[in-house]
Amino acid sequence: MKLLCFLFFVLISVNVNAGQKLTYSYNNEMFEGYLSNPKSQSKGLIILIHDWDGLTKYEEKRTDMLSSLGYTVFAVDLYGKGNRPKEMKLRKAETKKLYENRTRMRELILAGINEVNVKKQKTIVMGYCFGGSAALELARSDKGENIVGYASFHGGLKTPQGQSYTANTSPIFIAHGGADKAVKLEDVFQITNELEKNKITYEVNIYSGAPHAFTVFNSKRYRKDADEKSWEAFLSFIDKKM
């Protein structure tokens, strides 16, 4: 465990494998993602979905951390090139647009996957906060080729009315803070009941004392212990799927 914590510290402290911005289009709209390739042969593809403030340095850091471990990682853009809202009301407005048009949300994720998955690699779709909610939205849609798993870090867990998970949904990983006031524990229990009912393989980890957004570096909500443990659990999850 001490070695894993040391390696985690090295990964977040040093930009060991810097990626690059990648502009792509969907329906004549321009988007700008962030692609990071491993230095050796890729173990598989990870699609990372950003939080409600858009694709920022935080997602770039996480992307680089994963690529340094041997994965091809692409942080997709669901807002559009240059759209990185700073104010809370603007962030709420952007997520509201996608929550009210979930078809577009799914299509934008798939557009990002199709942009980089030319070799049809096994794919994990994961995200943070809003991005975690978006990853589960795609999981419920039963769309996307070669997806072998989904992951949500402190994301919204409620299933919208009229939606459900199907029996052939790929395994799901959920990391949740026990002190999260934005996403209640009742939501965690509800989704586990849904997944059990549909016989879907899942893993749910709850970290004591961890508030919403507990993985965001350099924030008041950051909890080092919960971040390290959830990261280790996530790496174990994807290692079994790739």
Image (spheres, helix red, strand yellow):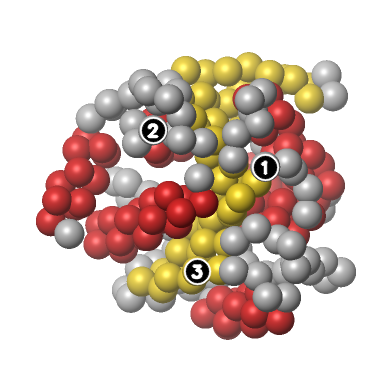
Can residue 108 be seen at all in this image of the molecule?
Answer: yes
Q: Estimate the x, y position of residue 67 in percent, counting from the top left.
A: 40, 32
Q: Residues within 10 Å of mark 3 (few under 14, many from 20)?
A: some
Residue with the mark numbered 3: 203
Q: Nearer the viewer, residue 98 or 134?
A: 134
**Callout 1, which amino acid?**
Asn
> Which residue is found at the position 23% from the left and 30% from the top?
14
Q: Estimate the x, y position of residue 95 in percent, counting from the top left.
A: 68, 48
Q: Nearer the viewer, residue 78 or 67?
A: 67
Q: Nearer the viewer, residue 205 or 79?
A: 205
Residue with the mark numbered 1: 146
Residue 87 is left or right of residue 97, and the answer is left
Q: Earlier in the sequence, mark 1 or mark 3?
A: 1
Q: Earlier in the sequence, mark 2 or mark 1?
A: 2
**Callout 2, which amino acid?**
Gly
Quadrant of res 106: top right
Residue with the mark numbered 2: 70
Q: Secondary structure at mark 2?
A: loop
Give how far apart the Cα atoms at labels 1 and 3 are: 20 Å
Q: Nearer the viewer, residue 206 or 211?
A: 206
Q: Secondary structure at mark 1?
A: loop
Give how far apart the Cα atoms at labels 2 and 1 are: 18 Å
Mark nearer the viewer, 1 or 3: 1
Q: Residues within 10 Å of mark 1 (few under 14, many from 20)?
A: some
Residues marked 1 and 3 touching at CB (< 8 Å) = no
